[in-house]
Amino acid sequence: MSTEVMSTKAMSKYMAKQVSKLCWIIAFAVGATGHGGGGFAARRVRGTWKGDSETIVLGTGNPHHTETQAEPELRSVPFTMVIDKQDGRRFSGTFSSPRSSEKILAVFSRDGTLYMVDDEGYTHGTMLAPDRMELCYMYVSTTSRIASCSEMKKQQ
């Protein structure tokens, strides 16, 4: 009986040590990726960002895209986003193409996802690196549908 107690105690110590190591590994991994407790929310995104869209449009379009014929059209449009105001995870600025410019409002969720709205649609985004983000825009109305993603690069 005392051998069973010893091996149970030894096993308990061993397990506690392994769990402790695992906790340190997880803490390091979360800290290194920036996903812990709003790591992306603290990113400084103020400045000028540029990128080209990969877009599919059907219907009347929007201020950045002209009307299409009866079939969906694949398009690419150069965009510039100037973020001139940021407070923590909230920011605002201007999103522009050669055809139009509009005010944007955005916020990072605590998991790092970016949510942005403009005059007529909404965008979900992800930080790919400190100087690169992907923005995916969706718009739907009774006369138009648009789906688009753009990789934006921060300008120096």
Image (cartoon, grey):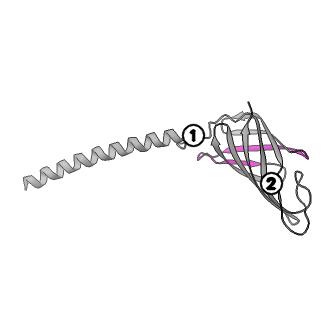
Name the spot of residue 111 as percent of width and height, x first: 58, 47
Residue at the image point whose x is 90% and y is 46% from the top: 100
Name the spot of residue 93 as percent of width and height, x first: 79, 38
Q: Circle 2 is placed at which residue position? A: 121
* Kind of residue sitting beneath label 2: Gly
Give the magenta range: 98-117
Residue at the image point whose x is 67% and y is 34% from the top: 44
Residue at the image point whose x is 23% and y is 49% from the top: 12
Name the spot of residue 153 as percent of width and height, x first: 72, 39
Helix, strand or loop for the magenta stretch, by majority: strand
Residue at the image point whose x is 84% and y is 53% from the top: 120
Could you say which is closer to the camera, residue 24 or residue 151? 151
The quarter of the rendered structure image containing the C terminus is top right
Could you say which is closer to the camera, residue 21 or residue 90? 21
Q: Which mark is residue 108?
A: none
Name the spot of residue 8 as percent of width and height, x first: 17, 52
Q: Circle 1 is placed at which residue position? A: 39
Q: Quadrant of residue 82?
A: top right
The Cα atoms of the two marked residues, 2 and 1, are separated by 26 Å
The quarter of the rendered structure image containing the N terminus is bottom left
- Position of 85 with respect to 7 (left or right) is right
115 is within the stretch colored magenta: yes
